[in-house]
Amino acid sequence: MKRGPARGPLSTVVGIVLLALMLFPVYWMVNASLQPAGSVLPSGWFPRHPDFGGYATALRDQRRNLVTSLVVALGSVALSLGLAVPAAYALARLRLRGTTVVLFGLLVTQTVPGIVVANALYGAYTDLGLLNSYGGLILADSTTGVPFAILVLRAFMRSIPGEIIDAARVDGAGRLRVLWSVVLPLSRNALITAGLFTFLFAWGDFLFALTLNTTESVRPVTVGIYEYLGAHTNQWNAVMATAVLASVPAAALLVAAQRHLAAGITGGALK
Amino acid sequence: MRSGSPPVPDGTARVRAVSRTRLWARVSRWLFLLPALVYLSLFFGYPVVKNVVMSFQEYSVATFYTGAAPFVGLRNYTTVLSTDVFWQALLTTVLFTVGSIAGQFVLGLALALFFQRRFPLGGLLRSLLLLPWLLPLVVSGTTWRWMLDTDSGVVNEALRHLHLLSSGIPWLTGTSEALVSVILVNIWVGVPFNTALLYGGLQDIPARYYEAAKLDGAGRLAAFRHVTWPLLRPVAGVVLVLGVVYTVKVLDIILVVTGGGPAGATQTLATRSYELSFQQFEFGRGAAMGNVLVLVSLAFALVHLRADRRARNT
C-alpha cells in the first residue's frame, strides 16, 4: 500500500524533535523525581547525581495505595470484560432488534459527566454500605471501561467471517459455546486491547476515588498524589517519584498495545 | 432470524415444542446483553434520573442523617443560576473548551499531516506520541503544576534563559494566567487523541486522489485545500465534537493544577458541581449544576451524532 510520499532521514530528525518537545514534561517528571529531597531550587536539566530518596519516600508512603490501584484496576478489567464480551457478541452477531437503540445509548453515555454519576452514587453507596469498598470503587471505575470495551469488541467481532461461526453452528454448538470456543479465541487481540485500556481507565481514575471514599481504607495512588500535593509540596522529589510509579502501566501499554495492534486481525483463521 | 425449515405440521405437541425452542432462542439471545444493560442502567441511567430528582430537593448533609429530602421546586436552580459565580463558571467552561479544542485540533492535525509522510522510525515515533494521553490525568496535572511554578518551575526558567522575560509569569497564581495554564495542560493531554483520529482519517483518503491532483499540477497547499480537507471534514467534525463532549466535563486536571483558583478564576461547571456537592455538601445544588452541564454536553452530542451520520454517508 502506498501511503504518502516517502521522505528521508531529515523527516526522522524533525519527528524526533517534535516527539522530544511533546514528551518533555514526561522527561521532566523523571528528572524531578531524581533530585535530592527538599530542593525547591530550580533543578538541573540533567539528574547528574541521581538521588533515589524520592523513590524511597514514595514507596514508604504510597506502596499501599499503589497496591490498591492495582487491585481496583484488575477488578475493573475483569468486570468490564465480563460484561462487555457477551454484550458485544450479542450486538455484533445475534441480530437483536434493539441493536441500534443500544448502540445509540452507548454513545449517549459518553456525554454523562463523571461528577453527575458521582453525585448520585454517593447517596446510593451510603445507603448500600459501598462507600470505602473495593467493590464499590471497581463498579464505579468501570463506567468508562464497559462502553469502551463493548464498542471495541463489537467492532472486532463483526469482522469475524460469518462462515466460521456458521460452521460451528452446523456442528451443533450452542451460542455460548460458539462465543467461548470460536469467537473469543479469534478476538484475542481485541480482548487485550480492550483489557489494557480498561485497566488504564480504572488506574487513572481520580474523581470516583476522591468522592466515593471518605477514609484511607481504599485509596488509589491518584488520590495519594493529590493528598501529597496538599501536604508535601516541599518534597517534590517524592511527589514526582510517585507520579513516575503511577505512569508505569501507561508506558507498559504503549509497548504491549503496539505489538498487539501489529498482530494480524483474524490471524489467518480462514486459511 | 435465519432458522432451518419451518415446523412440519404433523402434530400440535410438536409445533408447541418447536415454538417454545424458538421463543427460548429469542430470549436467550437477549441474556447475552442483559448483564451489560443492567450495569449501564444502574451506573448511567440511575445517576442521570437521580440527579434530576435531587436537583428539585433540599438534599444536604441532614439528608444522610434524617433521610428527609424535601422537595423545593426550582429553588436549587434559582439559587445556583442567580449567582455571578455561575455565569463566571459558564464563561470559563466555554473559554476552556473552545481554547482546548482549538489548540488540540490544530496541533493534532499538524502532527497527523507530518506523520503521514513515510520515513524511518515514523511509526514508532507516532505511537510514542500517545504517551501523554495514556498517563493518569493526576500525573500530568501534577507534573505541569511543578513545571509552571512561578519561582522554581522550568517554564519560567527556560523563558528567563532565553531572555524573554526578567520576572516570572504567575502561571498558576495570576487570575488570567491560570486559565491559560489549564488550557495549555489540557491541550497537551488531548493532542495525541486528535493526532491519532485525524491520522486514521488521512489514511482513509485514497492515494489516487492525490495522484490525480498532482497530475492536474496542484501544489501541496492546493492538494490540502482541494483533496485532504474536504475528504477529512467528516472525520474532523467527529473529532471536534467528541473533543468538546469530553472537554466540557474535565475535572481532574483543573482540580490538580489550580484547584479552581485563584479566586475561582478556573472554576468550570464541573468543578463547581464538585464543590457544591462534595465540599459544601449541598447535593441538591450540585445536582442542579451537574444537570446544566449535562444539557451543555447533550447539545454538543446531538451535533456529534449529526456529524457522525454525515461522516458515514460520505
Image (tube, rainbow, N blue to C red):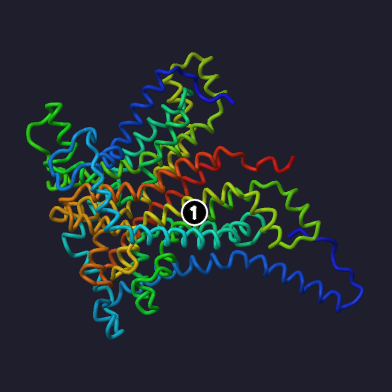
Neighbourhood count class around disc 1 (C-alpha, 10 Å): few under 14, some 14–19, many 20 upward: many
* Quadrant in which residue A176 is drawn: bottom right
Q: Position of residue B264 (x, y in %)?
A: 16, 56
Q: Judging from the image, what secondary structure is the residue with disc 1 in? A: helix
Quarter in which the N terminus of chain B is drawn: bottom right
Q: Which residue is painted at 24% across and 61% down in the image?
A: B272
Give the farthest residue toward the left: B167
Q: Residue at x 54, y 59 (%)?
A: A81
Q: Is residue B124 left or right of residue B312?
A: left
Give the mark count: 1
| Left or right: B35, with A39 as reference point | right
Q: What residue is pinned by disc 1?
A: A148
Give residue A216's position: percent from left, percent from top: 29, 68
Q: What residue type is labelled 1?
A: Phe
Q: Give the answer, above or below, for where B254 lies relative to A266.
A: below
Residue B221: x and y, percent? 41, 21
Q: Is residue A189 left or right of residue B179?
A: right
Res B112 quadrant in image:
top left
Nearest to the observer: residue A135 or residue B5: A135
**Closer to the camera, B249 or A17?**
A17
Viewport quadrant of the C terminus of chain B: top right
